[in-house]
Image: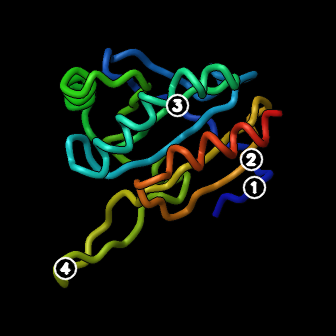
Amino acid sequence: MLKIGDIAPDFCLKNAKEQEICLKDFRGKWIILYFYPKDNTSGCTKEAIDFSEALDRIHKLGGEVIGVSKDSTKSHKNFIKKHNLKIILLSDPEHKVIEKYGAWQLKKRYGREYYGTERKTFLIDPEGKIAYIWPKVKVKGHVDEVVKKLQELSA
């Protein structure tokens, strides 16, 4: 289980344009790395739109936003286009990175158990260390909390 102060595990995944994006490419910036269950579902759409709307404030604080789900690059491309998203979305179909960050969890729905992505956010500092973790995210108000923590820690 990752904790504050740990080095964020590096990874490379494809974005909506099929380009490989690696975490190490963002050294020197604050990274908001968030994991979410599925493109185009209500909570995930709200979260992505909220991050997109806050992106100017995040950029001014030296930050970048990266969302990761097991959706395909094609799904991300459609999701971005449909909702005019401005954030980076990466595809992790084998959920290897999702697992590495502890976001692959046993879930229950309608009495059925299955594994899926737990909504989880990490704030990674410019040196690549985990500065803060939101382990079980509720979408409402989350982006404001993240921006507030980024302001506090980047000051």
Please, which colouring scheme is shown?
A: rainbow
Viewer-side label of 4, 2: 2
Identify the residue position indicated by label 1 in the image: 4
Instruction: Work out which quarter of the rendered image holds the C terminus and state it.
Output: top right
Query: Disc 3 on helix, strand or loop?
Result: strand
Q: Amino acid at mark 4?
A: Arg
- Disc 1: CA contacts within 10 A as few (<14), some (14-19) or many (>=20): some
Q: In the image as oriented, which residue stretches furthest toward the bottom?
A: 111
Q: Amino acid at mark 1?
A: Ile
Mark 3 touches mark 2? (CB < 8 Å)? no
Identify the residue position indicated by label 2 in the image: 131
Height in image: 49 above or below 19?
Answer: below
Mark positioned earlier in the residue sequence (4 or 2): 4
- Disc 2: CA contacts within 10 A as few (<14), some (14-19) or many (>=20): many
Q: Residue at x 43, y 60 (%)?
A: 138
Q: Amino acid at mark 2?
A: Ala
Q: Is residue 19 left or right of residue 124?
A: left
How much space separates mark 1 and mark 3, taking CA atoms?
A: 18 Å
Identify the residue position indicated by label 3 in the image: 65
Residue 22 position in % (x across, y down): 55, 25
Mark positioned earlier in the residue sequence (3 or 2): 3
Viewer-side label of 1, 3: 3
Identify the residue position indicated by label 4 in the image: 112
Foreground: 128 or 132?
A: 132
